Amino acid sequence: MPADPDAIDWSSLVHADGSAEDVPALLSALRSSDADERNEAISDFYLKLFPFGRVFDSTAASLPFLLEHAEDVTAPGRDWVVPILVEIGEESAEGCAGAHGPDAAEVEALVILREHAGVFVELTSAPDSRLRQAAFRGVALFLDDPAQAAAVLRSRLPDADASIERRLLVEAMASLALRTPAVSEQARAWLDQVASDDDADLETRLAAAVQRVRCTPAQIGEDAVPAAIDLLRRMKPYDARLLHTIHDTLDGRTPQRTALITEYLSDPHPRARRDALRMSKELMCSWRGDHTGLISRVADRLDDRHLAVSADAAAVLHSCHALIGPVRETLAAYVAAQRTSHGPGVWAAPQWHLRWAHQEAVCALARRGDLRALPSLLVALDSGVDDWRAVEVAGCLPEGGDQLVPRLIPLLDQVTAAARPHDRTSFYAMLSALAVFGDEAALPALIRALDTAMDGAAHAVLRALGSFGPAASGVLDRIRPLTTESDIHVRRAAIAALWSIGRDLDEALPLLQGLLDEPFDFAVAEAADILGQIGPPAAVAVPRLRELLTHSWLGARFASALWEIGGPPETRAVLDTLLHGWVNDPETTDKVVTCLDRMGTAAESVLPRLRDELRRTRRCENWSVDNDERLQRQYRAIIERLS
């Protein structure tokens, strides 16, 4: 390794701030005897040479000097240097194995670290435990001889002087097994041995059991989770990290994960119960399945003696509101009991956890359209305390419009007048709710909002006005001038509202055709949606819609519009486009399935794909539980109708 950083042409290298010419001074400061100077250099290293895990060519070039630093027993700051070396190696290894291919800097960094893996072997027996713990990971990651790496890790266990050190050793062994299949069998055997060693401490045994499962998740036996639960139950104090590791390792094994969570939902330690609630949310939001038992166990925690646990339970039910059918009465009873015990104003209670628990429970009920949420929402709107939360769910209670609309109208006026950026979300939510209620008493307020809408929000007001249909015909003269606005957002919304309210095909059709030729994808897509609503009378748009079927990510929307207008003669082109979008862009699934549903028997050929989608166990990434559950119902309905 070079002894002099000045021997490198750092000006030809870069880091996050540009030229890497300042790296030699930074490397020197990392070895400073002045702790403040050293800490500032550490911060600079992370910001410049390793920001958010990114590896630059200057990062790789600095590694020989960091390795030299790590070996120097007289140098200060080694407890920082060794972990950062391992972190850089981990990020580089992950990048090299990624779908986008290796980056040259990551490859170089990994080569350097593997060439000097002996440094980490030596450090596994260093006097400083922080150095040893980081070095275990380095041995598993960098040593080219996997048998030697396994031997080193095994040999260090008897001398490990702390439970965390033993846990990191077994974790490193599992990582080695995952990296190098050649030693995976002997690594698993060793982990089994440690897990079943009655003379070992419970934490080490459990860590070994968890890491054994991590090594071969496809081979998890029926006894793996009960055995882990038994060890967890016997181990005090509660260990969150081990619980989360085995939970994550179980992946889509819903029954096993449910058993693990259920055990901890009744744990004496409130932190354990809160962790279990967070894991229950993660499981139900990420994986399909029968969650009836788990949702019931979560609802049981509403009456927990610790308000923080109650609030977490209510928050989980809110996040998973599409699944709360089996506990809906329990939830409603909880909301009623809170109002009885703490008064009707409990929504605005000064105790944070009490207020939060009540609000989450009320919002969960409201999301299901349950009018028993209404009294608390009215308290929110009347008091102004967290009224934004009530506004967000108000539109879920259309039957409560007679009481909600008179409260939302003045609130809309206030927000519009203030024109504050942080009010934008509530502004949109109020517009959405008023659109759902369809109460014509709100029209004057919406017109006022159109005149004074906060910057960039006029299009949202136009959408709300359009939802009233012909009942809002009195505002057509206000809308027509906006159909030629230079702002494309306002123009497209005005054209949409013009059609929804006026229903004059001769007036709307030329404007919609004009939108189809706009350079803005979102405007073209909206025009297609409206033309699809018009149906066969919009046949003049068919040639342009056919051209748009090849669009990279909006093809499904154009195909849907083409079907609504052209019907069965367009079946082949429409199906091909829908299926292409479905495969290549999951975000189009909603539009695809809705169109398939409307196509009827013309969509028979996609039955196998629908059945495959229904067999999926993992929910689509970034989808809400509600959306995924609704899609499953659509799949079943289409399959039943076409089978």
Image (spheres, rainbow, N blue to C red):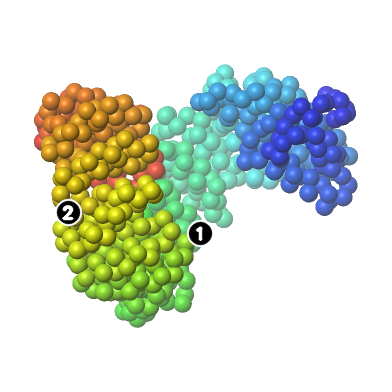
Asked which secondary structure carries label 2, the reply is: helix
Asked whether residue 572 appears in the rendered view, the answer is yes
Across and down, in percent, residue 292 comes to: 28, 51
Give the side of residue 293 with respect to residue 7, left or right: left
Q: Which numbered tag is attached to residue 502?
A: 2
Q: Which numbered tag is attached to residue 242?
A: none
Across and down, in percent, residue 271 comes to: 51, 59
Q: Amino acid at mark 2?
A: Gly
Q: Pointers 1 and 2 in contact (CB under 8 A)?
A: no
**Residue at the image position 60 percent from the left and 45 percent from the top:** 201
Asked which secondary structure carries label 1, the reply is: helix
Give the side of residue 577 with respect to residue 343, left or right: left
Q: Quadrant of the N terminus?
A: top right
Q: Quadrant of the C terminus?
A: top left
Crowding at mark 2 (Cα within 10 Å: few <14, some 14-19, many 20+): many
Residue occupied by mark 1: 271
Crowding at mark 1 (Cα within 10 Å: few <14, some 14-19, many 20+): some
Work out how far the residue at label 1 is from the one at label 2, CA to CA, in angstroms. 58 Å
Q: Vertically, is 484 above or below 594?
A: below
**Residue at the image position 46 percent from the left and 47 percent from the top:** 230
Q: Earlier in the sequence, mark 1 or mark 2?
A: 1
Relative depth, front residue between 560 and 23 = 560
Q: Vertically, is 282 above or below 188?
A: below
Across and down, in percent, residue 314 comes to: 37, 62
